[in-house]
Amino acid sequence: MKCSAFIATSLDGFIADSKGSIAWLEKANASLPAGEDCGYRSFLSSIDVIVMGRKTFEQVMTFSEWPYSDMPVVVVSRTLRSLPKTTPATVTLKNADPIAIVSYLQDRGYKSAYIDGGKLIQSFLSAGLINEMTITLIPVVLGGGTSLFGALERPIWVTLEDSKAYPFGFVQNRFRVSASEYPR
Amino acid sequence: MKCSAFIATSLDGFIADSKGSIAWLEKANASLPAGEDCGYRSFLSSIDVIVMGRKTFEQVMTFSEWPYSDMPVVVVSRTLRSLPKTTPATVTLKNADPIAIVSYLQDRGYKSAYIDGGKLIQSFLSAGLINEMTITLIPVVLGGGTSLFGALERPIWVTLEDSKAYPFGFVQNRFRVSASEYPR
């Protein structure tokens, strides 16, 4: 199956600021033309399951509306024992490593997963399980925060498949990650 | 005067790997079509003085040929007491902070400086003295190394002026840094 990341970072590679906040990203998004979502809905329509880390899940649960409609969501956590009662029925909690998660998804017939959350993307990337990354660069240098990428055993070379500069200054790059580039 | 950075980073924002090496960048550059320099010569022709940190200077001194012709070069270092005897006569050593360096350059009539080296770019950026940054993204995740950007007192929002995706997978973005965005 295909696993994709779709995420925004600052120029210095952060997905959240030093307080764990994405207010800077919301500020940037607020300046966008009405209806502009930088390909997010189109990306969502190409996947059939969302896999997210606990922090991302907890952030989504603070939103006024559940943003994923009836799309199946798997929350991956080593610490969470159960989901809040207000969680939609489409959400499943799993405590498993990336290889087991992919196996679980494949057994259920899923073909294309959206991997969301910094730590989860890092663990999938380290495990050789990310096939595509769409990274939207926001024109700000934050100076600190939570990095999208973490430590690796060796570099991973990727292939640029598409690059788009938006008139409001975002630059969205899509990369393919070949299995042969993974440290195996 | 105008101060510009022109530098390549990995997708995770590193300018050198965890051993301080740029072999990964040389590997990437080796795959480029003959004569392709991603705008470097054109950039060099737009500036009239190069300001670099000690590490960058020491790296350049290992090159088989001095790459800056008769362009004036200022090496900024707090620790270096004198330059090696093999240093070209175009090179001056200065122990001074970014504001004093810019003042020194302006006094000598320079209009456009190329600020090179990670630490030096960071100190100029923190001091509100970088006006333009051209950052070429190399399609590799290094997983560790020397970051281009460092800590900041507060975020710096920049303006995308140009973005170019090369067929060999580099993405070069040029940003303007407005004085109003600096933490002053």
Image (cartoon, coloured by chain):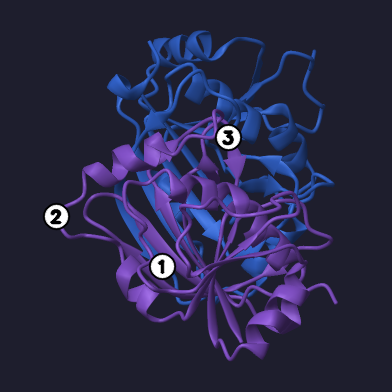
Chain colours: A blue, B purple
Q: Is residue B56 left or right of residue A26?
A: left
Query: Amino acid under label 1?
Result: Ala
According to the picture, the residue beneath numbered tag 2 turns out to be B34
Query: Amino acid under label 3?
Result: Gly
Q: CA distance from mark 1 to mark 2?
A: 27 Å
- The residue sitting at 35% across, 32% down in the picture is A177
Kindly state the secondary structure of the residue where label 2 is placed.
Answer: loop
A99 versus A69 height, above or below: above
**Do we see residue A27 in this rendering?**
no
According to the picture, the residue beneath numbered tag 3 turns out to be B145
Same-subunit check for callouts 2 and 3? yes
The chain ID associated with circle 1 is A
- The residue sitting at 74% across, 33% down in the picture is A55
Kindly state the secondary structure of the residue where label 3 is placed.
Answer: loop
Q: Quadrant of the N terminus of chain B?
A: bottom right
Residue A183 x/y as whole percent: 40, 15
Q: CA distance from mark 2 to mark 3?
A: 29 Å
Q: Tell which residue pokes out farthest to the left in this image.
A: B34
Mark 1 or mark 3, whichever is nearer to me: 3
- The residue sitting at 40% across, 22% down in the picture is A110
B141 versus A67 height, above or below: above
According to the picture, the residue beneath numbered tag 1 turns out to be A165
Residue B174 x/y as whole percent: 46, 70
Residue A124 x/y as whole percent: 51, 22
User: Residue B100's quadrant in the figure?
Assistant: bottom right
